[in-house]
Amino acid sequence: TLSGKTAVITGSNSGIGLGVARELARAGANVVLNSFTDREEDHALATEIAKEHGVDAKYVAADMSKGEDCRRLIKDAGRCDILVNNAGIQHVAPVQDFPTEKWDAIIAINMSSAFHTTAAAVSAMRASGYGRIINIASAHGLTASPYKSAYVAAKHGIVGLTKTIGLETAQDPITCNAICPGYVLTPLIEAQIPDTMKEYDMSREDVIKNVMLERQPSKEFATVEQLGGTAVFLCSDAAAQITGTTISVDGGWTAL
Ligand code: NAD
């Protein structure tokens, strides 16, 4: 079990981050939730998880688009044995129309935040004798789709960062890996359905079936619980020699 370990999960008041936090807590880890919103319901999520799983849980507000906030999150967490870099946003547009501020935000939140949190967390992991860095990349860290230039660039970037940190920590009791989900029906995916409908001139049902799950041979969404379970596995002893690599949870997408 992960009891006595503390997990910091960026962007964890929703979707995959929250699912991963719940599964790590179920496995006994104390959890630190994060988003930039700092609402009452964000803090309430931590209270709920603490109660349900008998672990310590707290919420720390920090904006993952800002380097100093990323580093402060690790400091305010108090301890970080397991770091899950999950915060991410999406924007869908052809490259000639892609807004520069969206490009910058996606590169900052989806990629650079992991550099800052990792830099802030790795020394204490070395000193404590246990560390797990788990980057939530994407099937789009290994393949591309049109109209997602910033997202695909950031996700390929985080796969490269994962390999590099895997090498830098190879002789330490630390592993660094990326989980590459295919489509998971979270608010992030919900939000891109309207834009994708416009790009492809399709109905909602057709976007789900013919664009999203078209790429996913299983024809099923992956679930946040399955991603949480993969993270728990990466934290285990069985996974101690798995480092610097990617694990796809994508229903066969990247086998195509
Ligand atoms: P989501 O929108 O449900 O969750 C995104 C999380 O990031 C939220 O908790 C949000 O608060 C947080 N966030 C956004 N901007 C932030 C900021 N500036 N500072 C701090 N937190 C911020 O989306 P999701 O689908 O759960 O996505 C989570 C991760 O999984 C992302 O990195 C995404 O790219 C990746 N992913 C998702 C899918 C999918 O199909 N849903 C597939 C592959 C990869």
Image (spheres, rainbow, N blue to C red):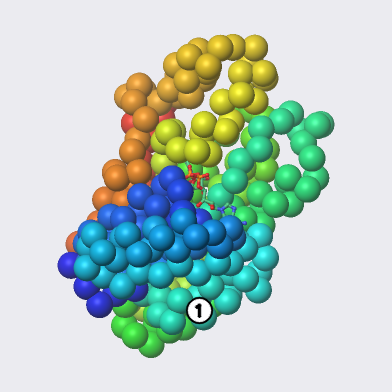
| Residue 27 x/y as whole percent | 21, 62
| Residue 235 x/y as whole percent | 28, 64
- Residue topped by disc 1: 76
Side of 249 relative to 236 (left or right): right
Q: Residue at x 58, y 31 (%)?
A: 192
* Rendered-image quadrant of the C terminus: top left
Up the image or down, 168 lies above or below 228; here it is below
Q: Residue at x 26, y 50 (%)?
A: 229
Q: Nearer the viewer, residue 244 or 48?
A: 48
**SS under mark 1:** helix
Is residue 183 visible to us here? yes
| Residue 108 x/y as whole percent | 66, 57
Q: Amino acid at mark 1?
A: Asp
| Residue 245 x/y as whole percent | 40, 55
Q: Hey, which quadrant is residue 37 in on the image?
A: bottom right
Q: Nearer the viewer, residue 152 or 104?
A: 104
Q: Is mark 1 within 8 Å of ligand 1?
A: no
Is residue 252 visible to us here? no
Side of 246 relative to 49 (left or right): right
Up the image or down, 78 lies above or below 6; here it is below
* Rendered-image quadrant of the N terminus: bottom left
Q: Residue at x 31, y 51 (%)?
A: 228
